[in-house]
Amino acid sequence: MLNNGTLEATNGGTLTLYAGTITNGTHGIIEAVGADSSNNASTVVLTAGVTVSGGTLTTSGAGTIVVAANNTANLTNITNTGTLNVQNNARSFRLAHHQQRTITLQATGNSTYFYAPNATVLTGTGSLVLASSNGQYTGNVDAAGGLTNDETIEGAGLINSGTFTNNGTINANVSGANLTLQSFTAVTNTKTMEASGGGTLVLNGSSWNNAGGTITAQTGSSVDLTGSVTITGGTLNSAGTGQVFVAANNIAYLTGLTNNGTLNVQNNATN
């Protein structure tokens, strides 16, 4: 299907895009607008492996666009200016994505994916949020085909696999929960990676090129270096009661970097 106009849900209705391919022209828009008089949100549901290529996804008011639970949607070269929720055990596949609002992985115990099977770039002013409504943070950002983050990824869960470059912000900001980064074939941080709000940022293994980048534990939060992680260049910081630590019984290799904070090497660990 070619869409050169507008596909929309309004007045509390639901528009379901089921399987197949929708190619949006230059002015193609898919949108969820507001709610009805009883505050039932208008919803666009992406399901059954539907592919949406090009154009804009947008919402207003209470309107939402969702990748239905236990389903998959393939989104290529799109601009997201709305609220896009990936429900529990769903997968959203991305290529070259421009983001001005929020994508939320709504995990509740099953792996819920933002998946980059090919080279993918997140650009713009929006956020990718790894969230949960029941405290089971199983959101997974899988960079298998190569993922570049030029915006913000935040929350708790897992970022892993393939090649990953952070030119924006990674923030482990869920109190008492971990945001773990691991199992990369190549990984670079040129900007900001931090733990805040009582969260823990875990760097588990992999060899980080951190030239020009900062890794920070804000007050009440922690950065955990584990699994023989290697960090080369850049800066380690902490603020207030925040701490960077090498986990007990683990090794971290730190080369050519500047430490401006509290770095603790726990029992039987090596730095």
Image (tube, rainbow, N blue to C red):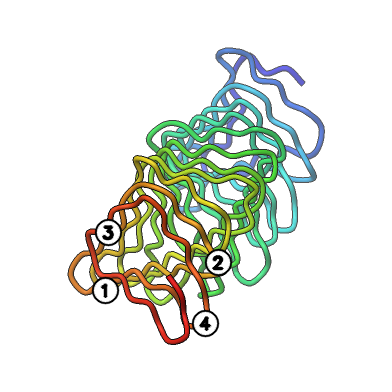
The N terminus: image quadrant: top right
Assess whether mark 1 and mark 4 are in contact (beta carbons under 8 angstroms): no
N-terminal-most mark, 2 or 3:
2
Between discs 2 and 1, the one toward the N terminus: 1
Query: Mark 2 and 3 residues: CB-CB less than 8 Å, in contact?
Result: no
For disc 2, the marked residue is: 228
Q: Tell me residue 239's x, y (percent).
A: 20, 65
Few, some or many residues within 10 Å of mark 2 (<14, 14–19, 20+):
some
Instruction: Mark 4: give few (<14), some (14-19) or many (20+) Cα within 10 Å.
Output: few
- Pointers 4 and 3 in contact (C-beta within 8 Å): no
Q: Nearer the viewer, mark 3 or mark 1?
A: 3
Q: Is residue 140 left or right of residue 248?
A: right
- Residue located 38% across and 73% down the image: 245
Q: For the residues marked 2 and 3, what is the alpha-carbon distance in whole angstroms?
A: 18 Å
The 10 Å Cα crowd at callout 1, few under 14, some 14 to 19, many 20 or more, is some
Residue labelled with disc 1: 220
Q: Which residue is mark 4?
A: 249
Amino acid carrying label 2: it is Ser
Real-space CA distance between mark 4 and mark 3, rounded to the nearest whole angstrom: 22 Å
The picture quadrant where one finds residue 241 is bottom left
Label 1: which secondary element: loop
